[in-house]
Image (cartoon, rainbow, N blue to C red):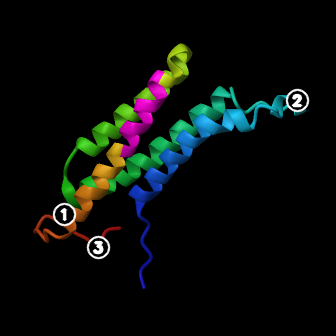
Amino acid sequence: MKFKINWDALGITASLACAIHCAILPLFLASLPLFGINIIENHAFELGMIALAFVVGIYALWHGYRWHHHKILPIALFSIGILSLVLKQVFHEYHNLLLIPGVIFIVAGHYLNYRFCRQHNHAHSDDCDHDHY
């Protein structure tokens, strides 16, 4: 039995976890500075999470593009979302204005990639090699 990782599902899960982190974690962890721990405004941690999301997301989307649907739209939407997350780190006064659309673009890119891959799996065209997961 061959084990396959659904990279789009992993990317969507990571994006939603990021959204939950950004929305709820500050409320939950507001007491940590009392103990000398500051993760809420840690820019290195935030940039590291964005970089991790970019690496996992691009891998998932590239796989779908290369081996299944050959459509650039999911990668473009995802890239706009990641750019929005990077910009929110630079322009702090627009944090929520950039965060919400960024997460929506990232999830939309993964969702479209998932849909395009599922549609193409049933096409059985000659340009597809489904053995590469």
Query: What are the residue bounds of the magenta stretch?
Result: 97-107
In which image quadrant can residue 45 be found? top right
Q: Residues within 10 Å of mark 2 (few under 14, many from 20)?
A: few
Please indicate whether residue 113 sits to the left or right of residue 57 in the image. Answer: left
Q: Amino acid type of disc 1?
A: His
* CB within 8 Å, label 1 to label 2: no
Considering every residue shown, the one lying at the far right of the view is 35
How many numbered marks appear? Answer: 3
| Residue 64 lies within the magenta run | no
Q: Nearer the viewer, mark 1 or mark 3?
A: 1
Percent of width and height locating residue 43 = 64, 27
Is tag 1's residue or tag 3's residue first in the polypeptide sequence? 1
Q: Residue at x 73, y 33 (%)?
A: 39
**Residue picked out by circle 1:** 120
Q: Secondary structure at mark 2?
A: helix
Q: Residue at x 25, y 60 (%)?
A: 117
Q: Residue at x 69, y 28 (%)?
A: 42
Task: Name the quadrant of the N terminus.
Answer: bottom left
Q: Residue at x 41, y 64 (%)?
A: 6
Above or below 5: residue 33? above
**Residue picked out by circle 2:** 34
Considering every residue shown, the one lying at the far bottom of the view is 1
Q: Main secondary structure of the magenta part?
A: helix
Task: Name the quadrant of the C terminus.
Answer: bottom left
Is tag 1's residue or tag 2's residue first in the polypeptide sequence? 2
State the separation of the CA atoms marked 1 and 3. 14 Å
**Residue picked out by circle 3:** 131
